[in-house]
Amino acid sequence: MPYTVRNYMSTGLITVLPGNSLKTANDLMQDHWIHHLPVVSEHMEVLGILSQRDVLRSSVSTFADIDIETKNQIDSGIPVSEIMVRDLVTISPETSLQEAGAMLMEKRIGCLLVTEHSRLVGIITKSDFLKMVMDFLAKLESPVRPIDI
């Protein structure tokens, strides 16, 4: 039985619309401790993705000689559509974990968006793969209990 993305993808998705601001995206990432934020239409059609790196690159530096209110005002005026990555790599929920892992490594990306009929249904990240490895290693290292007869 091949292991598929469907069994390991995250489905409690935090997303933004293209008209949302850079500040909104940054706040969501910080509030939910996430590094990737899919950009979707009102119908959950995938339009782009933002990584934490994209947000940091586009935001006013904390080293800039401006106060936080001004920084927030500037970031609030930048729509997500201006900074999102549009060249997307998407996979289906039935994609094997081996294929998905190879794609992450080959393309040097941090996540894959999981879609069905152009609609976002999940996301699988490098962190998800690391968690899978840790779970697997824990199972390998756990002592085998003798069967009581």
Image (cartoon, rainbow, N blue to C red):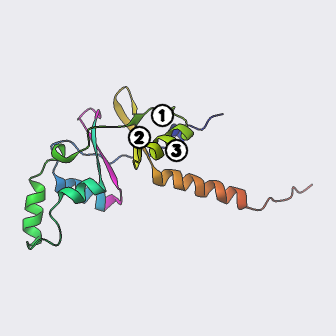
Q: Which residue is tagged 1?
A: 93
Q: Which residue is tagged 3?
A: 8
Q: Quadrant of residue 39?
A: top left
Determine contact: label 2, label 1, CB under 8 Å.
yes
Q: Residue furthest top?
A: 117
Q: Which residue is rendered at x = 35% and y = 56% of the image?
A: 34
Q: Taking 106 as reference, is 32 above or below it?
A: below
Which of the two labelled residues, at mark 1 and mark 3, occupies the earlier sequence position? 3
Mark 3 secondary-structure assignment: loop
Which of the two labelled residues, at mark 3 and mark 2, occupies the earlier sequence position? 3
Q: Quadrant of residue 123?
A: top left
Q: Which residue is rendered at x = 40% and y = 46% of the image?
A: 111
Residue 27 vs residue 66, the one in the foreground: 66
Residue 64 image offset from top left, x and y in percent: 12, 71
Determine contact: label 1, label 3, CB under 8 Å.
no
State how far apart marks 2 and 1 are (Cα): 8 Å
Q: Amino acid at mark 1?
A: Pro
Q: Quadrant of residue 55?
A: bottom left
Please give left or right for residue 98 compared with residue 104 in the image: right
Which of the two labelled residues, at mark 2 and mark 1, occupies the earlier sequence position? 1
Q: Which residue is tagged 2?
A: 122
Residue 37 image offset from top left, x and y in percent: 31, 49
Please give left or right for residue 9 compared with residue 64 in the image: right
Mark 1 secondary-structure assignment: loop
If the image is split into quadrants, where does the C terminus sit? bottom right
**How many residues crowd mark 3 within 10 Å: few (<14), some (14–19), many (20+)?**
some
Magenta stretch, residue numbers? 31-46
Please give left or right for residue 26 compared with residue 72 in the image: right
